[in-house]
Image (cartoon, coloured by chain):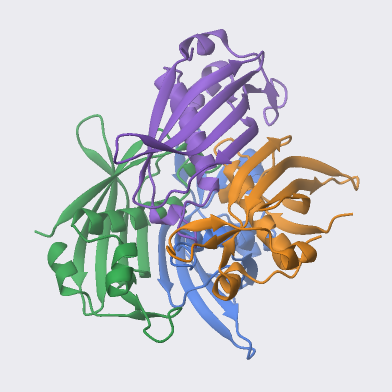
Chain colours: A green, B blue, C purple, D orange
């Protein structure tokens, strides 16, 4: 079974739109935060350190596919559950499920997102340029 | 050829993250704005009016699939080009392409998103509940 | 001593700007969330309920004055400490202090904000209009 | 008369909260963007260039005081008018007025903000540390 982490969200008033429900780009924001929290909880050092020590800038998104099943609103507590679905040569595929606990002990699935992320480092010549790099084996070990 | 609209974005400093590039949930935000701008430019009245006259609350997202090809940064001007790819019974599929003009007269594709949106109205009994509804024929006409 | 509540913030990557520090409008967002959390922790029902039962829509801002002393960055945990500094006829003045714990057991003051908020209700005739209203005595009791 | 610039805002659906009006931290965001736009329109090079050539990172906020007079909502166009109220040794004070045109040719003042900003550069020894610096005379000239 793959390593799985959870990340808690308290939905704020300002996260909601005039329809009174979470404005959906906030779900992207929370999945991004859950993605980083996954790496941190697995023991990967912060990118700002890895940039200095190994030139690894982070894991920018190549692709995200999100499906929205139920709406959520302010005052609610949501949980993002994250795991890696697939490792490729230079890419990691993360799955995020955002759920809300129900009074009956079950949970409602609010939305589900599949992120494809590349590992990138700064170019040795031109520091403003980012380049894809092979998934570092130690990071893969930590996260599996 | 389907009706196509464009929407201009001036990328702000605060739209960018510590890597110095646009923080990706902002692309979702801009696609959402472009989606609404599409309906407005096609002559559909604001949802806040349609809610009062016909109970139509808007077009919440069911699904979004975005691919990121190049990064963008603050000070740049981007264009979102939007059209409807498909109309289904209760659903509209919108395509958004975000591009940046190049000095040579061409353009770079920054990212591309496909949104599946439902038309919803408030439930007649329980005003807090939103219900899917058939795509209004007049709105479809205006947008095609 | 006035009633005081605390609200915890986990600073996310996307909360930070290209300088690598919290983009300051996020402090406004967190103070707004802390303002609402203050009322909830004091036992005031959610505005969405009070709107239905008593027409009270919420406490929109009239004024905010924020001073920034130190920067914060992602991965850090901050605490917003909130209390009411002053009650006026139709207005409440809230103070928010955002701090970060230090390794030596002390804390650093990151920023400090003073919010002046009005209590408003929907106009009886024109529901789109908001009107200032006297501070409800029961709410004042709960929050003092 | 001080140099004055304007910056246009198209209020988006997602800029508004469940009360249907602009969520106030967005005004901070727009004032920040107007602050930068002011410097750019006056002919100051982007901070990312000044950081490389002269070590100047930007003008982080020390203090902001905003007063809210009228609400605004999506679909509206607002104008931010910006000028420098005062130059001090290491500090610039900017005033932003956000207005909305009225049908009668006049304008409504939505909100007004006074920002106190420091000029900062990276520390020569510790590049992660930011230090206040005297207002560069050439930038002051351009902006007056």
Quadrant including the C terminus of chain A: bottom left
Which is more toward the observer, B76 or A84? B76
Query: Residue shown at 70%/67% (left/top)?
Result: D40
Quadrant (top left, top right, bottom left, bottom right) of the N terminus of chain A: bottom left
Q: Residue A9 sits in which quadrant?
A: top left
The answer to which of B64 and D11 lies nearer the viewer is D11
Residue projecting furthest to the front: D125
Is residue B49 visible from the viewing direction of this image?
yes
Q: In the figure, C55 relative to D121: above or below? A: above
Q: Position of residue D3 (x, y in %)?
A: 83, 59
How many numbered marks does the figure carry? 0
Q: Is residue B9 above or below residue C123?
A: below
Residue C116, located in which quarter of the rendered image?
A: top right
Which residue reaches farthest bottom? B104
Q: Is residue D11 visible?
A: no
**Relative to the observer, which residue lies in front, A102 or D134?**
D134
Q: Is residue B24 left or right of residue B73?
A: left
Q: Whole-percent x and y of residue B42? A: 67, 63
Residue drawn at x 32%, y 80% as measured from the top left: A132
Residue drawn at x 23%, y 48% as measured from the top left? A6
Q: Position of residue B10 (x, y in %)?
A: 63, 66
Across and down, in percent, residue A46 comes to 29, 60
Q: Residue furthest left?
A: A1
Q: Nearer the viewer, residue D96 or C57?
A: D96
Left or right for C33, reference A122: right
């Amino acid at each position: 079974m793959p390593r799985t982490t959870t990340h808690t969200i308290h939905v704020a008033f300002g996260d909601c739109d005039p329809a009174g429900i979470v404005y959906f780009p906030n779900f992207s924001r929370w999945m991004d935060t859950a993605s980083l929290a996954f790496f941190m909880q697995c023991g990967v050092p912060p990118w700002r350190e890895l940039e200095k020590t190994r030139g690894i800038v982070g894991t920018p998104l190549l692709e995200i596919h999100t499906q929205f099943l139920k709406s959520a609103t302010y005052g609610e507590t949501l949980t993002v559950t994250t795991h890696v679905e697939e490792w490729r040569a230079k890419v990691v595929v993360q799955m995020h499920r955002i759920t809300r606990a129900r009074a009956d002990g079950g949970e409602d699935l609010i939305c589900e997102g599949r992120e494809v992320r590349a590992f990138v480092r700064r170019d040795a010549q031109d520091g403003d340029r980012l380049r894809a790099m092979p998934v570092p084996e130690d990071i893969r070990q930590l996260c599996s």
